[in-house]
Image (spheres, rainbow, N blue to C red):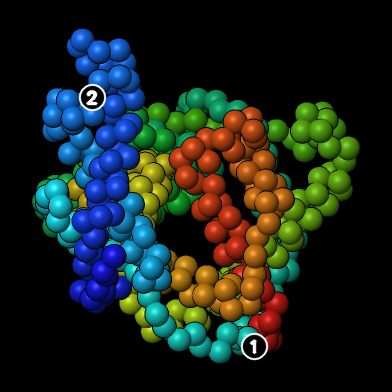
Amino acid sequence: MKVTVKNTGTCRQTLKIEVPAEAVAAERAELLNYYAKGVAVPGFRKGHAPKALVEKKFAKDMAADLKDRVVPKFYHEAIEQEKVKVVAVVDVSEPELVEGKPLKFEVTVDVLPEFKLPKYEGISIKAEKTDVSEKQVEETVQSILRQHATYEDIEGRAAKEKDMVQVSYESTIGGQPLEEKVPQARGMGRGNGYWITCDEESFLPGMGKALVGSKIGDKKDVTVKFPEGFIVKELAGMKAEFKVEVTGMRETKLPELNEEFLKKIRVESEAELRKNIREHMEEAAKNKEKGRQQDEVCEFLLGKTKLDVPESAVKEQTRNVMYDMARQRMMSGMNQDQIKAQQEDMMKEAKEKAEEQVKLRYIIMAIADAEEIKVDDHEISAEVVRMAVQQRRDAAEFRKELEKNGHLESVGDQIRFGKTVEFLLEKAKIK
């Protein structure tokens, strides 16, 4: 088999493949034997019809099956022969099968990038404090109490801090309806029956504070300035005028932190509650700091490594990032119309993130290869069990599903990625 390999783009190669006529003839003969044994021809017992008759009767079917059989077989052999490190098959040309002549076709593939790793041992990282203050513990205690709060309608007084106020509103920017000015904010320009906690930040910055002192039936004009980093990026830094009407009020009644409440949440004493909270917060703070340090290691590697990445890998990861971004927006309260209005900007952001993630994956995997960091089946099985428990699935069935869908290998890749980042963190200089 003759194979020539040509670079045809960034991380892309085209293989020109010529399969000898004899090899194609052997495949055709094998396929004919298969047909002759398995098909029924009128006037003959199954498997006893003359091959020439079978070949004539099923010529079209055999030609299609032969293509489906020989093209993948020989391009896989060509890839192995030339030691091409394939990421994805991008295109396969339509071959012309002519009996007695060589089979010629082309396969275009994306390949692993070639690049030089930076010095990755001894990366300098600045540690940040993970102390937990008594104030943070108290805030968590209050949060727990709020989770068990009850609410009573307010009559005869104005709203005060921590009260819940129900509002209807319409908004404009520079006299123009908010949703006309910023189409990406569809669904945010008006609202009915929306509850806001007084003097607390809501998705409308400053609205809660402005409602302190209001009563049912009050109408107010409130100016909202959307902060930098607001979820609807087009609104960041802009001011909007909200015409608000108060339609309901409720007082938040927190339970007392007494023996009855502690028993309800299965804690022996207030001291034990605070101790548990502190330990949990300290553990969370340490994990958060470790994650931050890992991010710093990854940022260092991205900044110090020059490499191009395969287009197909970026496209696939862009789809994954887009899905996550849409899901996060839906969880934050955005509807499908709002998400659709942001689709173009989301796609741009998703592609940038995806390219960075793909680059990092190749860098980390190259380090894993260099350091011979491996993952055994025990580690994969343990992770599959953890994932199954998280999703409330039977572990054995979940593993079978992963194997069937070809996702079990990616579980191993994720474990290997994590082990490699952990290795880099252990070798880092943390100050």
Q: Amino acid at mark 1?
A: Gly
Near-viewer residue (427 or 368)? 368
Q: Name the N-terminal-most of marks 2 and 1.
A: 2
- Residue 62 found in image quarter: top left
Q: Nearer the viewer, residue 106 or 90?
A: 106
- For disc 1, the neighbor class at 10 Å (few under 14, some 14 to 19, many from 20) is few
Q: Give the left or right position of residue 98, taking residue 307 as reference.
A: left
Q: Is 426 rendered above or below residue 376?
A: below
Q: Nearer the viewer, residue 185 or 397?
A: 397
Where is residue 208 drawn, in percent x and y? 42, 47
Q: Residue under circle 1?
A: 122
Which mark is drawn over residue 50?
2
In-front residue for pair 322/48: 48
Left or right relative to 35: residue 385: right
Specify the quadrant of the image occupied by residue 123.
Answer: bottom right
Work out how far the residue at label 2 is from the one at label 1, CA to CA, in angstroms: 74 Å
Residue lying farthest to the top in this orientation: 43
Q: Position of residue 309 (x, y in %)?
A: 34, 72
Q: Is residue 382 visible?
A: yes
Nearer mark to the viewer, of 2 and 1? 2
Q: Quadrant of the C terminus?
A: bottom right
Going 33% across and 31% down the picture, which residue do you hit? 34
- For the point 63% across and 77% down, the residue is 371
- Is 89 drawn above or below residue 368 in the view shown? above
Image side of residue 406 versus residue 367, left or right? left
Q: Which amino acid, mark 2?
A: Pro
Q: Residue at x 52, y 70 (%)?
A: 365
In x, y percent, where is residue 419?
Answer: 64, 66
Quadrant, the N terminus? bottom left
At mark 1, the secondary structure is loop
Q: Where does the image place residue 370, in percent across and percent down from the top left?
A: 59, 79
* Mark 2 element type: loop
